[in-house]
Image (cartoon, rainbow, N blue to C red):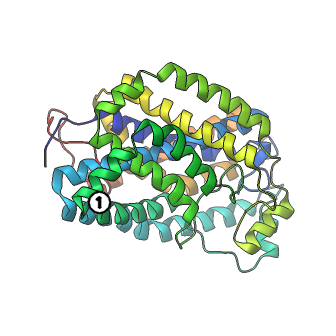
Amino acid sequence: MHTQSRFHYIDNLRCIALLLGIAFHAALAYGPYFRNVWFTADTTNHVLFNYFANWSHLFRMPLFFVIAGFCAALLFNKRGSRHFIKNRFKRVLLPFFIFIPLVFGLTFHAITWGLGFAKTTPAVYVVFEQVKDLPISTGHLWFLWNLMQFCVLFWLLTKNQKAYNLVLSWVIKPLFLCALLPTIITISMLNVAVPFPPPDKLYPELWSFGFYGLLFLVGAGLFEHKDKIAQIAKQFHWLLLLATVSTVAYFYVLPPAFTIEQVIDAAKTGSSAPKVIAFVPVTTQTIAILSLTAVGFIAGYKWLNIENSTSRYLSDASYWLYLIHVPVLLYIQFALINLAFPALVKFLVSISLTMIIGLITYHFLVRNTAIGVLLNGKRIPLTNKSVQATA
């Protein structure tokens, strides 16, 4: 076991990935591509939000799981296997069980309240009228449920040091990163809709293990072999070119938006699997995911390895902000739904107010309370350089 200086770029990247989720969910209301699937779909919309939401969706959570894997290996090296799993139960699983009834209760109230005065009811509510037995969903807290599953498997891997070293040395080899990783992810997602949905079921979804689970392992491998990060960083411009080209190609082959009939069918079956496998869109999506995630990670490594009071505060607050942002966003977007403001204005107002409410509640109700300790651990002064980033 060993102790190293804090990886500030990991803190900052995790913060950005989580805060980007707020912008992503806000954009769903104003992108016509999502008019049949989002709770606050607004008749005032613009195609710009289609591109922003679909683009950010490609890499924000993949990047988060790479970071989570990095932090998992960091914590294991620092404190050992037993402390690692205890920490993950406390910081991941316990918040999941605490916040899911709170978030779902507020979400239900926000929807009930909003539908009471919305002049135009978003199309997705037809689903609730026609499908009485909706499958149980973990909502936007799916990331905690999946992360805990990956952490348990990672903990089991740490029990065999030889296997641990072998696996984490393999997942950062060029052959794996350039050939096996995209192949496995593509195969895992062949029976999943494009754009890929959240793995939000209570039961383990195997495609998530072949996608987010592998990226988690890659992140752990990058921690154990940190010299590889500098080597990969040398390919930044080529990866940026690949990310740009693959993203443009992805938008070109992106399937049409879900019809309301498809949404109803997916709700009845509990699956959005396509009837015909779309190999080209799935493959293009995989290349865009991996290249954008790599670009994001390297950009953080190169330019975000800094710490100041603002970045540290936002890093601490981002977990709380992400946990509670969906119901807050719904209240705000329902309040705006009848107003004849441009979509960009509604988007900016909804994000700004969500952030303000989130930060105020964090500062006064969370930061210096038991909830803050639960989510982020005990806060350490900026001058303490021996403490590392944790997931």
* Residue 296 location (% of width, % of height): 48, 32
* Residue 378 location (% of width, % of height): 20, 52
When asked about the image quadrant of residue 84, the answer is bottom left
Q: Is residue 69 left or right of residue 141?
A: left
* Residue 57 location (% of width, % of height): 61, 43
The answer to whether residue 1 is above or below residue 298 is: below
**Residue 71 versus residue 39: which sits nearer the camera?**
71
When asked about the image quadrant of residue 301, the answer is top left
**Dot 1, how many residues are within 10 Å of its Cα: few (below 14), some (14-19), or many (20+)?**
some
When asked about the image quadrant of residue 48, the answer is top right
Q: Is residue 351 visible?
A: yes
Can you name the residue that lies furthest to the bottom here? Answer: 133
The answer to whether residue 151 is above or below residue 58 is: below
Q: SS at mark 1?
A: helix
Q: Which residue is mark 1?
A: 374
Q: Is residue 7 left or right of residue 280?
A: left
* Residue 318 location (% of width, % of height): 41, 45
Q: What count of labels does the image hold?
A: 1
Q: Is residue 29 left or right of residue 78?
A: right
Can you name the residue that lies furthest to the front here? Answer: 175
Q: Amino acid at mark 1?
A: Leu
Q: Residue at x 35, y 68 (%)?
A: 94
Q: Residue at x 24, y 66 (%)?
A: 86
Q: Residue at x 71, y 55 (%)?
A: 193
The answer to whether residue 336 is above or below residue 93 is: above
Q: Is residue 353 visible?
A: no
**Residue 110 versus residue 373: which sits nearer the camera?**
373
